[in-house]
Amino acid sequence: MTKLKYFLVFLTLIITVNAMDIFNFFRKSENTETQDTIGSHLKKVNPSKTNWKEKTDEYWKESMTPLQYNVTRHEGTERAFSGKYWDEKRPGVYHCSGCGHELFKSDTKFKSGTGWPSFYDVVTKENITLKTDKRFGMTRTEASCARCGAHLGHVFEDGPKPTGLRYCINSVSLVHSEDIETKAE
């Protein structure tokens, strides 16, 4: 009887947690087909001639996958080792998945062992906005896209030479140059 009681309490707890959506962490990944749609809204616009700061929350919600929207617009995080680009090795440039802005070159990407794409430098410092993030009881440096304000990830001072920096970036915040489709300039 005691085992049945513990089982029922455990089952009730699982159902309650799922209903409250508290531990959404375990679902913070999307299947490959969904990840392949990230950045597809860019083919409808000319990214360099669009005023991304004027886009509404409704635009972002309709244009992005649920995880991409949560990460880029509400400073969320995808689960480690679940994103499309964490182990990507193709040469090219990584763009902001929100607005197509160039952010990182593949030759600055390195394997950090964290499960997120990591880079030691940016294409140009003007393309990234850095600010102090004191959430969750720690002080970190948040990295965002300077053009559209999308949350990208965080920067740490434990990276390789020559910069000593590690830009730890969510895959859903990025789209690789070979995967991006944009309207002609």
Image: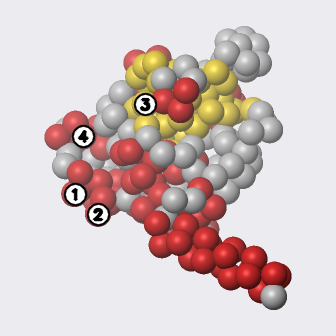
Pinpoint residue 31: horizontal percent, then vertical percent: 60, 69
- Mark 2 and mark 4 in contact? Answer it, CB < 8 Å: no
Colour setting: secondary structure
Residue located beneath label 1 in the image: 58
Badge 2 amino acid: Glu
Separation of residues labelled 1 and 2 (CA atoms): 6 Å
Q: CA distance from mark 2 to mark 4?
A: 15 Å
Mark 3–mark 4 Cα distance, whole angstroms, equals 13 Å
Residue that appears at 49% across and 64% down = 21
Q: According to the image, label 3 marks what residue? A: 144
Q: Answer few, some or many: residues within 10 Å of disc 1's Cα (few below 14, many 20 plus, some between 14 and 19).
A: few
User: Do the CB atoms of the residues marked 1 and 2 lie less than 8 Å apart?
Assistant: yes
**Residue named by callout 4:** 52
| Disc 3 from disc 1: Cα separation | 20 Å
Front residue of this view, candidates 27 and 178: 27
Instruction: Single out the mark in the foreground, 2 or 4.
Output: 2
SS label for mark 2? helix
Of badges 3 and 4, nearer the viewer stands: 3
Quadrant in the picture for the C terminus: top left
Q: Residue at the spot x=38%, y=39% of the render?
A: 150
Sequence-first disc among 1 and 4: 4
**Closest to the observer, 127 or 115:** 115
Pointers 3 and 1 in contact (C-beta within 8 Å): no
Q: Which residue is mark 2?
A: 62
Q: Nearer the viewer, residue 122 or 155?
A: 155
Q: Quadrant location of residue 96?
A: top left
Mark 1 or 4: the one toward you:
1
Compared to residue 166, the image places residue 177 above or below, namely: below
Q: Amino acid under label 3? A: Ser
